[in-house]
Image (cartoon, rainbow, N blue to C red):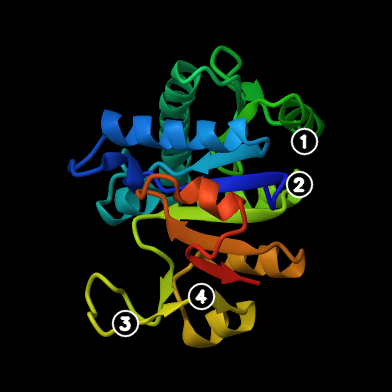
Amino acid sequence: MKYKRVLLKLSGEALMGNMQYGIDPAILEQYSRDVKSVVDAGVEVAIVIGGGNIFRGVQGVAGGLVDRAQGDYMGMLATVINSMALQGALERQGLKTRLLSAIHMEQIAEPFIRRRAVRHLEKGRVVIFGAGTGNPYFTTDTAASLRAVEIEADLVLKGTRVDGIYTADPEKDPNATRFENISFEEVYERGLNVMDLTAITLCQENKMPIVVFDMNKQGNFLSVCQGNNVGTTVS
């Protein structure tokens, strides 16, 4: 395996599968099998998952439901729900897991402590980071970049439903072409929607590569960890 420790970022929307909202059990099972194949190969895996399939803070603001800070806290709780669902799926595959939350909720998750997270990884446990950074105005992309830097991961793997970064949205523009490799500077210049700018800057400043790949294709996660040319690498 090319990498020893990776952080996998999954979007909440990815868990919906073909549904309009919520969690698709088939998608959850596929993801857990893919994670197991990587762990069985000797890679230490940490995961950050979004909450957009349940609640997104900006939607609450746009609808006049709550202010931005309150909406973001609600979104953080949605990520914990997804994290618990993923934890259950991983444990059904026979994996040992730990859920660490940036917001204290002792009955269901350990508080995030960096040294504890690293120790769990060293023991072969899959570590799931819930509740984002614990602060409003920060996305789960930023949380993924921050946690990856803190645990000294080799790279951030962003699992999406497309097979990399394109010149335009491939679902809307049939002429869009995929990058195999791209620099952080070019991502800025082209205004590409890889991750939010805070997350991108954090990775750039800490020399943390990002690989964007299709998580819905079974075996891709393992292939990336083996160092194969899957998706798009930002470095």
Point out the image quarter for the C terminus.
bottom right
Q: Name the residue nearer the viewer: 228 or 162.
A: 228
Q: Which of the two discs, 3 and 2, sits closer to the camera?
A: 3
Residue 206 shown left or right of residue 173 in the figure: right
Q: Earlier in the sequence, mark 1 or mark 3?
A: 1
Q: Is residue 112 above or below residue 145?
A: above
Question: Real-space Cα distance between discs 1 and 3?
Answer: 40 Å
Labels 1 and 4: the sequence-earlier one: 1
Q: Position of residue 151 (x, y in %)?
A: 75, 43
Residue identifier under label 2: 150
The residue drawn where x is 48% and y is 38% is 76
CA–CA distance in space, label 3 to label 2: 35 Å
Instruction: Say whether disc 4 or disc 2 marks the residue closer to the N-terminus.
Output: 2
Badge 4 amino acid: Glu
Q: Is any part of residue 128 visible from this angle?
A: no
In this rendering, the answer to whether 31 lies above or below 69 is: above
> Answer yes or no: do the residues labelled 3 and 4 have beta carbons within 8 Å?
no
Amino acid type at mark 2: Glu
Q: Which residue is depicted at the point 72% across and 31% down?
A: 121
Distance Cα–Cα, label 3 vs label 4: 13 Å
Which numbered dot is residue 114?
1
Q: Position of residue 31 (x, y in %)?
A: 41, 37
In the rendered structure, the answer to whether residue 93 lies left or right of residue 47 reads left
Q: Say left or right for 46 vs 81.
A: right
Specify which label sits upstream in the sequence, 1 or 2: 1
Nearer to us: label 3 or label 4: 4
Mark closer to the observer (1, 4): 4
Residue 204, given in percent of the width and then of the height, sits at 70, 70
| Camera-nearest label, 1 or 3 | 3
Residue, disc 4: 180
